[in-house]
């Protein structure tokens, strides 16, 4: 049974940093794309960053480029999202997701096969 478990959310002041982690279990995630999505109240779920497990290549939403960094730890089967220079508009529930077939990175939430339960990130002004 595949499980994605996020951790590391919380409350931070604008300009601060947070690190999110996603512990993946239940299968081998080679050939998967691992993504971080976020959803703010009243808004659609959007892709923040994604990484191809085998290739290691990454993609970021324009709104977080140069501020967020996605990485993976093969030994621990974890995917991390380091967030810096946080802004109030980064406030959302952040979800870890996994998509089979890493040959393309999709920004559509419906293309992802597995999801974590989400972790709240709140940035105060």
Image (cartoon, helix red, strand yellow):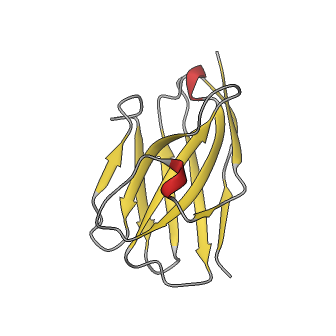
Q: Quadrant of residue 22?
A: bottom right
Q: Quadrant of residue 103?
A: bottom left
Q: Nearer the viewer, residue 76 or 28?
A: 28
Residue positioned 48% across, 55% down in the render:
35
Residue positioned 47% across, 47% down in the render:
108
**Number of numbered discs present?**
0
Tell me residue 105's x, y (percent). 35, 56
Q: Nearer the viewer, residue 35 or 17?
A: 35
Horizontal placement of 51 versus 121: left or right?
left
Task: Please identify the quadrant where the N terminus is shown.
Answer: bottom right
Tell me residue 71's x, y (percent). 41, 59
Task: Please identify the quadrant where the C terminus is shown.
Answer: top right
Q: Nearer the viewer, residue 68 or 1?
A: 1
Outermost residue toward the front in this view:
110
Tell me residue 17's x, y (percent). 54, 37
Q: Is residue 82 above or below residue 17?
A: below
Q: Is residue 29 above or below residue 92?
A: below
Tell me residue 81's x, y (percent). 49, 51
Horizontal placement of 85 versus 12: left or right?
left
Q: Is residue 82 above or below residue 1?
A: above
Residue positioned 37% across, 59% down in the render:
51
Residue positioned 47% across, 81% down in the render:
75
Q: Quadrant of residue 10?
A: top right
């Amino acid at each position: 049974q595949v499980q994605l478990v996020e951790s590391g959310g919380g409350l931070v002041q604008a300009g601060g940093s947070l690190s999110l982690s996603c512990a993946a279990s239940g299968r081998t995630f080679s050939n998967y794309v691992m993504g971080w999505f976020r959803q703010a109240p009243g808004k659609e779920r959007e892709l923040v960053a994604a990484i191809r497990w085998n290739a290691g290549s990454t993609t970021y939403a324009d709104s977080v480029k140069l501020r967020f960094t996605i990485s993976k730890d093969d030994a621990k089967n974890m995917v991390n999202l380091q967030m810096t220079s946080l802004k109030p508009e980064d406030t959302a529930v952040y979800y870890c997701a996994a998509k089979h077939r890493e040959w393309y990175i999709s920004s559509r939430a419906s293309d992802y096969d597995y999801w974590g339960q989400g972790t709240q990130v709140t940035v105060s002004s």
